[in-house]
Amino acid sequence: MNAEKISRIPVALTIAGSDSGGGAGIQADLRTFAVHCVHGASAITCVTAQNTLGVRRVDAMSPEAVVAQMQAVVEDIGVQAAKTGMLLNQKIIAAVALQVEALQIDNLVVDPVMVSRTGAQLIDNDAVKTLRQQLIPKAAIVTPNRYEAQILSGFPVNSLDDMRAAAQVIHRSLKAKVVLVKGGGMPGNARGVDIWFDGSKLETLTTQQVDTNNTHGTGCTLSAAIAANLAKGEDLWTSVQQAKKYVSTALTYSLDIGKGQGPVGHFFPLLQG
């Protein structure tokens, strides 16, 4: 990468799928980058036909196309941080992992999109294995939800103590630098509580719970907000804290659109008068 060509404006790259309904994926990521005053670039891994009711169709990009997008952005513009979302299959995951190293992408946030909030597995076991072995060890932070934490740790996650144990196992077994186990899908008082573990510090992060059914895209938005803050030069701990606060406020302004689960309100500061 030519250092002279790197933009002085903070740049973040999202490597993820497209959500035609606009609530998650690259659409959510780019809106999150924008509201943080970070220029957003993208490498699209798949195109989905979806709305607030669910996903109707998924078409994968070729690994070569994903790689070409990453190279085009990094070699010309440069990026200060990147995040991954839905990578869909083993070949794309392997290609992305190789390019993260080849392009020397730092500040990588891995949202290991494997399982939905309802517990449905979204990628096959070969893809999960490649994610575990090749991509997660390259991440500055990995942000699994409770069901993804179950797969990565190998045991059920039903309580805060389970979340703490899973974070430590994932850190140790997968060589993850920092693990943030998200509690958005947890029951009772654990809902919305996240657990941070960096090898020494085990912290519980809480925010005020927001009563809304319109939570589509919260995982994408959190990881994008972490990446945006990293691109602006914040340290990882501060980036996570600020990202969690942003998502909580965006949930307060969630959008009641469509017939199903609407998205969070990414541009809530524009609504504050």
Image: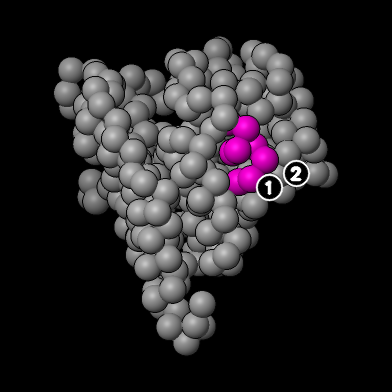
The answer to whether residue 260 is above or below residue 107 is: above
Q: Which residue in the structure is indicated by mark 1?
A: 137
Q: Is residue 147 left or right of residue 200?
A: left
Against 120, is 217 above or below? below
Identity of the amino acid at label 1?
Pro
Question: Picture coordinates of residue 269 (x, y %)?
Answer: 30, 50
Residue corresponding to mark 2: 175
- Residue drawn at point x = 67 percent, y = 14 percent: 156
The x and y percentages for residue 25 are 35, 40
Mark 1 closeness class: few <14, some 14–19, many ≥20 residues within 10 Å: many
Instruction: Look at the image and tell me whether residue 189 can be seen.
Output: yes
Which residues make up the magenta segment? 128-135
104 or 195, which is in the foreground?
A: 104
Q: How is the image coloured?
A: one colour
Task: Say which residue appears at 57% left-offset and 21% top-offset.
Answer: 147
Mark 2 neighbour density, 10 Å: few (under 14) some (14–19) many (20 or more): some
The reply to whether the C-beta atoms of the residues labelled 1 and 2 are less than 8 Å apart is: yes
For residue 64, above or below residue 147: below
Whole-percent x, y for residue 78 in the image: 45, 72
Q: Nearer the viewer, residue 234 or 220?
A: 220
Give how far across and how far down residue 256 sits, in percent.
21, 26
